[in-house]
Amino acid sequence: MEITGNFGTLQIINVYNDGDNNNMLTHISAFMRDRDRQRHTPGPVHTMWMGDFNRHHPLWDEARNAHLFTHENLDLTQPLLNLLARHSMKMALPLFIPTLRAHSTGNHTRVDNVFCTEDLMNAIIRCKTDNATHPVKTDHYPIITQLDIHATRVAWEPR
């Protein structure tokens, strides 16, 4: 999704990453490469990646979930960390906020996340989970992200 206004252009990528591979990272990398090469947007470009990354790492998961920090899981997470560093993306959802409660164990973990370009961090009013609106029969908590941006209003014409 793309929103344009006085602040520039905000590109939002909704992510679902399969737990067994990193195919989604290939698509994000290609998008970012093409975006930088074929820029036709007014003003500065801000980018946000949000969704289910299906990755565990001590940078965002609580220490009590150390059993999830296996070599295999950390190896799967490293390409994401490399991509975040390459594009100067920062974590907008504060540290250690769980985004999932496993049905089988009740354990809280952090598989969902919100990352954005560094210059967008100042526009974030809040970024947190909303456990009160936890949908029925799902183990993920909704993440509410509120930004202080002003999009240009387009005049509506009936057709």
Image (tube, rainbow, N blue to C red):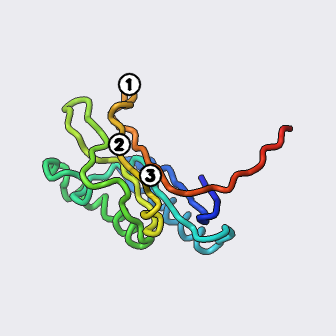
**The label number, if any, that marks residue 50 in the structure image:** 3
Cα gap from disc 3 to disc 1, whole angstroms: 21 Å
Write down the quadrant of residue 94 in the picture: bottom left
**Which numbered dot is residue 126?**
none
* Residue closer to the observer: 134 or 112: 134
SS state under label 1: loop
Neighbours of disc 3 within 10 Å: few (<14), some (14-19), many (20+): many
Query: Cβ–Cβ below 8 Å for labels 1 and 2?
Result: no
Q: CA distance from mark 1 to mark 2?
A: 15 Å
Residue designated by label 2: 129
- Give the residue at x 42% y 73%: 86
Is label 3 in a helix, a strand or a loop?
strand
In terms of image quadrants, where is residue 143? top left
- Label 1 or label 2, whichever lies nearer to me, is 2
In the image, residue 71 lies at what x, y percent? Answer: 20, 59
Q: Nearer the viewer, mark 3 or mark 2?
A: 2
Residue 63, percent from left and from top = 15, 53
Q: Residues within 10 Å of mark 1 (few under 14, many from 20)?
A: few
First of labels 1, 2 by sequence position? 2
Q: Amino acid at mark 2?
A: Thr
The number of callouts visible is 3
**Numbered label attached to residue 136:** 1
Query: What residue lies at 40% left-to-right and 51% top-to-bottom?
Result: 126
Q: Are marks 3 and 1 in contact (CB under 8 Å)?
A: no
Front in this rendered view, residue 96 or 74 = 96
- How far apart, in angstroms, are the residues tagged by discs 3 and 2? 13 Å
- State which quarter of the image contains the C terminus: top right
Residue 15 location (% of width, % of height) = 46, 50
Q: Residue at x 39, y 47 (%)?
A: 52
Whether the residues at callouts 3 and 2 have beta carbons within 8 Å, the answer is: no
Above-or-below relation of 157 to 76: above
Q: Amino acid at mark 3?
A: Met
